[in-house]
Image: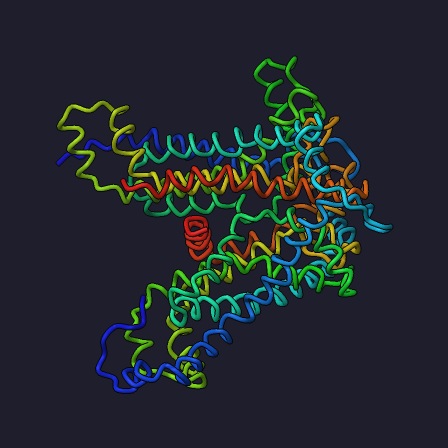
Amino acid sequence: MNHGTPSGDTRLRMSRLFPGGKSQKARATAVLFVLPAFTAYAVFVLAPLVMSLYYSTLRWDGIGKARFTGLANYVTVLTDPDLLSIIGNAFELVLYFTVIPVLLGLAVASAIRGHMAGTFGTLTRTILFLPQVIPLVAAGIAWSWMFASTGLVNQALTAVGLADWARGWLGDFDFALPAVGIIGAWVLLGLCTMLLVTGITKIDPSLYEAARLDGARPWHEFRYVTLPGLRQEIGVCITVTVISALASFDIVYIATGGGPGITTMVPGLEIYRLAFAHRQVGLASALAIVLMVLVLIAITPVQWYAREKK
Amino acid sequence: MTAAKPKAWLARLLLALLMTVTLLPFLSMFTAALAPSGSYPNGLSWPDDPQWNNFVKAFEAANMGQLLLSSTLIVLGVVPISVLAATMAGYGLAKLTGGRNKWIYLVFVAGLTLPFEAVITPLYYEVRAFGLLNTRFAIILPLIGLYMPFSVYWMRAHFLNVPNDLTEAAQLDGATRWKEFWLVQVPLARPAIMSLTILLFLWTWNQFLLPVVLVRDPSLRTMAGALGAFQGQWGTDVPLLCAGSLLILAPTVLLFLVFQRHFVAALLQGSVKG
């Protein structure tokens, strides 16, 4: 993509001989092309990010005078038992948001291993993508109803003779967080499945034949052909799902509001609550920065794994 | 050659199971929406006397006409400008800037994994300082900025794959460069632009955090943001809540069904590249 490729164009040679006006103009043009996007990005992302960093060093109720407190807010975020368990909740959600869709997606992909052609393929794609199209809020409302005391989950449990298990899932101290996790898994399941199903069609079929000639069992085939071949797609699934688990907001806001207690509270919702309900802008900002860093830390190894040469 | 594919019936069974799980919540909402308003229906049971009227009631209670208008205005404010700015920047970064300016691109990419929650607090004070709190611009302007990392990344990736001969045919000055951009590059980029438009439309329409924080009046919000308020108001009336939710998610689902192929392609590529 470099611009210096030899060419017979004399004007090009001129501009190399006299790098004054011409390249200056070229640079001005480049700047004009990039400027609108960069301005929007700078004003509404970079500047707020710097402000977040600044706020995180303050003790400020958002109205009165702010007081500089250095890193005190960060110390609170990293030592307060409530805030730590809220961060822990986000990581527990990863178990559901990431592990269930990726494992089920892998199972389906290796069972199909091929294009999903025809009407059945289109129908499958359409239905599995529905949760990606609707607002997360709607998914939250739908599942609040599924998990309600007269909802479908309890109805099904009663039908198979497990009426003792029926409960208001989202109000239960032990089961609320897994229930929220299931909502996320439901939303992300179709996307991961389709990514992996599409990815597996790109693996050279001769690899499978070779494996079979070598007497590989299905498990070995999966382990030594499918998994390495899907490295990039698995990386994508993990990245997308981990981010949506750690930065979750919509589903929790609608389904539980963080309750009961703080059993389903997540950093995203806690930032909102601290900043706008409790007027602890400094602490909210420190938590926001910590959340951003945690996402980066969680994503980086996945990117390395996905980029490694096959 | 018998390629001894894994058993097809197993695959179909698994898929059928997944599809059922995906559809059940919608079905359950649908049957609940037809139960008498204010009653406590069962998870999945066809009511004796389906109350189709609930949808009319929910339409009025949710102020659906106003919401459709508001969401459309917000989408129209966000998507065309974002796509244009990102296409220009993607072109500029892929074709007009060399190694020394790579940092600009890296600054954009650094925003790719940024959770919106990380900047929502300062955004509130910033938007308030601009005097835009509780207006649609409070959603529109920040979203344009927040979408730039992905959009620029996406368009740059497209322009990197366009052969250079096209651009080098002439060393162009600013004015002709601009012409070349519109007459040659943009038409060629149509598929990439189409996918980006679909993704940005969906993300804007379904955006929840910004409307909830920055706009108090539900009738000035996006559909998703208004749904939050609707739940707060009607949360105890399950049939009405279900009817309202189904109405609110209907527009995107309808669009999705019509443009199914484009949506699926956009969502798949979108996550691979993002």
Q: For the C terminus of chain A, give its image quadrant.
A: top left
Q: Percent from the top left, x then y, of residue B258?
A: 49, 57
Give the left or right position of residue A205, taking residue B17 as reference: left
User: Relative to A22, is B120 on the left or the right?
Assistant: right
* Residue B231: quarter of image: top right
At 60% from the left edge and 33% from the top edge, which residue is drawn?
A90
What coloring was used for the rendering?
A: rainbow
Front residue (pair B34, A221):
A221
Residue A271 drawn above or below residue A84: below
Q: Position of residue A135 (x, y in %)?
A: 61, 47
Q: Nearer the viewer, residue B5 or A218?
A: A218
Q: Nearer the viewer, residue B208 or B237?
A: B208
Q: Spot the residue most to the right.
A: A64
A224 versus A18 height, above or below: above
Taking the spot 41% from the left edge, 54% from the top edge, the residue there is B265
Q: On screen, B112 above or below A299?
A: below
Kindly tell me whether residue B274 is visible in this rendering.
yes
Left or right: residue A142 versus residue B150 is right
Residue A290 % position (x, y): 62, 40
Residue A48 image-quadrant placement: bottom right
Relative to B235, A97 lies left or right:
left
Q: What is the number of callouts on the image?
A: 0
Residue B44 visible in the displayed image: no
Place of residue B174 in the rendered image (x, y in percent of width and height, measured from the top left): 44, 83
Residue A47, by quadrant, is bottom right
At 77% from the left and 49% from the top, the residue drawn is: B57
Instruction: Report the residue at 79% width, 42% height from top.
Output: A280
Q: Quadrant of the N terminus of chain A?
A: bottom left
